Amino acid sequence: MGRYLEATAEVFPVAGSFTISRGSRTEVVVVACSITENGVRGVGECVPYTRYGESIDGVLADIRAVSNAVSNGIDRSQLQHLMKPGAARNAVDCALWDLEAKLSGTSVASKVLAVPPKPIVTAYTISLGEPDVMAAKAAENAKRPLLKIKTGTQDDEARLRAVRAAAPQATIIVDANEGWTDQNIEHHFAVAKELNIALIEQPLPVGKDAILARIKRPVAICADESVHLTADLAALRDRYDAINIKLDKTGGLTEALVMKQEAERLGYTIMVGCMLGTSLGMAPAMMLAQDTAYADLDGPLLLARDRVPGLRYEGSLVHPPEPELWG
């Protein structure tokens, strides 16, 4: 009996709403991929991202287009050449990892990690809102060790100050989602430095970040939308101190592992991040985030409903996936 592939779109409600500089949403639509062989089923999940020109229908079509190749036994190495990087390849790549683990009885962790995986601290994300609203949310979560706050307006100083006052002990990452400009960036950098912000993620739009190589960076700057592939890394080194690796950008765990190794060689600080998705989307990223400086794998914490079984969260501590979920 050969392999067969299935892909479906699934909707999960967000707890309240999730807002960044580009808009708000109250639900997340994910695409799940399963590959079955001899009654054994491997699964993966991706989140199509309109910022990168992706759509639900387009990603479903891209996954289904490789159905015959999967049936004919394509492996992960061949998949890298057959599909372009992005959400669709991520779902297929992770399903193949899961299937390999289940067929072999050998976990993904044992193949990619030198030691067994351990629980890690994830950032907890606070949506973009008015300063008092963000401060209230920060106060609710002030005991979490790592907060990530969404900014990206013309004047975020009040937001930064309000959140820091509400969570004085937390390590804070600021994610501007390309929302700042050449005119306001140095002001925001100075405020962030004063408030002991640990990291600023993607302050400027992709392709409009040359100023980062010319001005002082008093806080470490992390590339997100600017970096997708291993090949992107070298050219960004003069303007970024860190990179955010997301499986939906790299097109799966296979490429992400290569990218991480090269980023380490180039001296980047590494964050492993996520789109807003379920535990199935986070589980492979847990393999990548074991020894990185930052993990932002809080997607399930922001949903009103997660998959069952899901990852186990204890506050901001997220445990490695059980085999029933993935890997």
Image (cartoon, grey):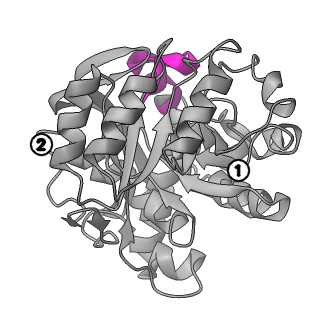
Give the structural element (helix, strand or loop) at label 1.
Answer: helix
Name the amino acid type tagged 2: Arg
Looking at the image, which residue is at 52% across and 25% down? Answer: 177
Bounds of the magenta span?
Answer: 42-63
Magenta-drawn stretch contains 32? no
In the rendered view, would you say 108 is above or below 49? below
Looking at the rendered image, the quarter that the N terminus falls into is: bottom left
- Give the residue type at disc 1: Gln
In this rendered view, identify the residue nearer to me: 243 or 14.
243
Residue 71 visible in rendering: no
How crowded pointer 1 is (Cα within 10 Å; few <14, some 14-19, many 20+) is rated as few
Disc sitting over residue 305 in the figure = 2
Q: Is residue 234 above or below residue 323?
A: above
How many marks the image carries: the answer is 2
Give the residue displayed 45% in from the left and 25% down from the top.
157
Residue at label 1? Answer: 78
Residue 45 magenta-drawn?
yes
Name above or below for residue 46 compared with residue 155.
below
Which is more N-terminal, label 1 or label 2? 1
Q: Give the secondary structure at mark 2.
A: loop
Q: Pick whichever, 171 or 70, lies toward us.
A: 171
* Left or right: where 207 falls relative to 18: right
